[in-house]
Image (tube, rainbow, N blue to C red):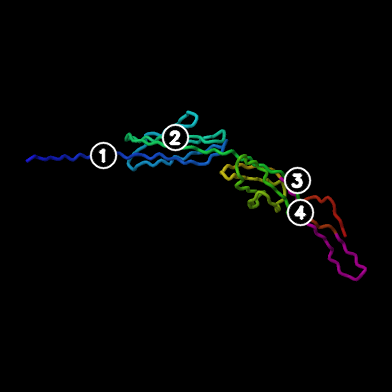
């Protein structure tokens, strides 16, 4: 009868990485962090990362900060090397949109406290769609809208800030100064005199003198 023999050999298969990175919508002219989301098996160590960019340059950063000068599709590749010799790579495109330019025009340089201030978003979205416009004046709560009316409750030289975002996530802001005149507080001082007519009563202007009045009219 033929004889039989067996021999068991244990083969250790090292864990392999899975290269991944975030693919956000970037904006031209705005630094964009790229998040390294690679999956590293437990018990293994990363030897190095290697990023290869559209312009022929490369880096060994964990997560780079990139700046795209113009719109378009930019190919980026990531390679992950483990100390056990295993590696993985991935390549994808980053879609870069045009930056939004915030802009608005003040209808007048100054106004009275609590008076209406109409505002319109005149930002340039350049091949993009408007997403959001947020207005903030002084310390008041922010208001949202592309066309709205503010009624400032504070007086003095107030900052007016417009922050805009395109539908693709590109942002920009613009701030201007607006002078708000305090609303005068009219008041009359009256001497407290009692008697029979003819009665002489002293009357004077007891209005708030914090801000000089241009004129006073008695009726």
State the separation of the CA atoms marked 4 and 2.
62 Å
Compared with 117, 69 (above or below) is: above
Quadrant of residue 47 within the rendered picture: top left
Q: Which residues are magenta?
A: 178-203
Quadrant of residue 60 within the rendered picture: top left
Q: Which residue in the structure is indicated by mark 4?
A: 183
Q: Position of residue 126 (x, y in %)?
A: 62, 39
Helix, strand or loop at mark 2 = strand
> Which label sits in the foreground, 3 or 1?
1
User: For this rendering, which residue is in front, 161 or 120?
Assistant: 120
Dot 2 alpha-carbon crowd within 10 angstroms: few under 14, some 14 to 19, many 20 or more? some
Q: Earlier in the sequence, mark 3 or mark 4?
A: 3
> What label sits on residue 77 in the rendered view?
2
Q: Earlier in the sequence, mark 3 or mark 1?
A: 1
State the separation of the CA atoms marked 3 and 2.
52 Å
Q: Position of residue 212 (x, y in %)?
A: 80, 50
Looking at the image, residue 155 sits to the left or right of residue 1; the answer is right
> What label sits on residue 12 in the rendered view?
1
Q: Which residue in the structure is indicated by mark 3?
A: 108
């Amino acid at each position: 009868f033929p004889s039989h023999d067996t021999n068991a050999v244990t083969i250790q298969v090292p864990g392999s990485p899975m290269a991944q990175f975030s693919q956000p919508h970037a904006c031209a002219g705005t630094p964009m962090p790229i998040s390294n989301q690679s999956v590293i098996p437990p018990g293994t160590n990363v030897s190095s990362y290697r990023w290869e960019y559209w312009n022929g340059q490369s880096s060994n950063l964990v997560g780079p900060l990139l700046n795209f000068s113009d719109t378009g599709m930019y190919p980026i590749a990531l390679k992950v090397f483990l100390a056990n010799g295993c590696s993985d790579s991935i390549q994808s495109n980053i879609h870069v949109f045009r930056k939004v330019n915030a802009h608005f025009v003040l209808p007048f340089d100054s106004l009275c406290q609590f008076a209406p201030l109409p505002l319109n978003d005149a930002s340039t979205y350049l091949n993009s769609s408007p997403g959001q416009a947020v207005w903030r004046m002084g310390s008041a709560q922010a208001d949202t809208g592309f066309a709205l009316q503010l009624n400032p409750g504070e007086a003095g030289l107030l900052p007016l800030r417009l922050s805009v975002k395109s539908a693709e996530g590109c942002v920009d802001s613009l701030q201007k100064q607006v002078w708000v005149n305090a609303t005068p507080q009219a008041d009359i001082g009256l001497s407290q005199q009692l008697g029979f007519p003819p009665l002489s009563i002293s009357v004077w202007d007891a209005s708030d003198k914090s801000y000089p009045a241009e004129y006073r009219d008695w009726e």
